[in-house]
Amino acid sequence: MAYNSVTGNSKLFRSVLVLSRFMQWASAAIVMGIVSYYINHYPKGEHIIYEEVIACTTLGFFLLPLALSFTKKTTWYIVPLDLIFSYLWLTAFIFEAEDYNWQSCSANAPSGAGSCSLKYASESFTFCAFFFTLLSMVIQMMAWISEEGVARDIHDKKADFARPSAETRITEGNSAV
């Protein structure tokens, strides 16, 4: 069987999609852990609650796309969810950048949590969650387009195959019946 570059690309896209979905989910889990620690030990702010909600909903909503990325058929149904969550993660990143980089990191959101390294880690993984959500959306579309191209090629090859019709069938020694 000859190597089909479109089929090979589709497999490559699915492999990268699995990795991207896992990194998206893992980044959201790390952000949820850090923000949950802040909520449990320090005063709460609106931005911290927003980040927690986005991280928790990402963990819930993206379990299915993570599992579906292992299947052989990709669909475009997840793309709107990726688009929405990429903007939500971008907003969370902007909130964290304002809270931790605008003035003194140790004095801002949550106040009393003196360590800036944990805040910067949360900010970094928030950006990672945004990036991998956006990357997953692009890869999902590319994989879907690649698979649609394969399906279209197979359909066209079947249409080009000439089959004898029942009305024009020619038998041995006779002309058309």
Image (cartoon, rainbow, N blue to C red):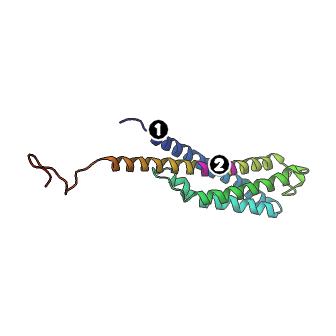
- Quick one: label 2, few (<14), some, or many (20+) residues within 10 Å? many
Indicate the position of residue 167 as horizontal and vertical percent values.
19, 57
Residue drawn at (77%, 50%) of the image: 123
Foreground pick, 124 / 176: 176
Q: Report, in whole angstroms, how far the alpha carbon at label 2 lies from the one at label 1.
A: 25 Å
Residue drawn at (59%, 57%) of the image: 79
Residue that extends furthest to the top in the rendered view of this protein: 2
Foreground pick, 13 / 146: 146
Foreground pick, 175 / 28: 175
Which numbered mark, 2 or 1, is in the foreground of this view? 1
- Under mark 2, the amino acid is Phe
**Image quadrant containing the N terminus:** top left
88 vs 142, left or right, is right
168 vs 9, left or right, is left
Residue 62 inside the magenta-drawn segment? no
166 vs 31, left or right, is left
> Does dot 1 land on a helix, a strand or a loop?
helix
Q: Which stretch did the figure color magenta?
A: 130-138
- Taken as a whole, is the magenta stretch helix, strand or loop? helix
Q: Circle 1 sits on which residue?
A: 5
119 vs 172, left or right, is right
Instruction: Return the mark for residue 75.
Output: none
Residue that extends furthest to the front in the rendered view of this protein: 175
Q: Circle 2 sits on which residue?
A: 132
Residue drawn at (75%, 56%) of the image: 92
> Does dot 2 land on a helix, a strand or a loop?
helix
- Under mark 1, the amino acid is Ser
Foreground pick, 167 / 108: 167
Q: Earlier in the sequence, mark 2 or mark 1?
A: 1
- Quick one: label 1, few (<14), some, or many (20+) residues within 10 Å? few
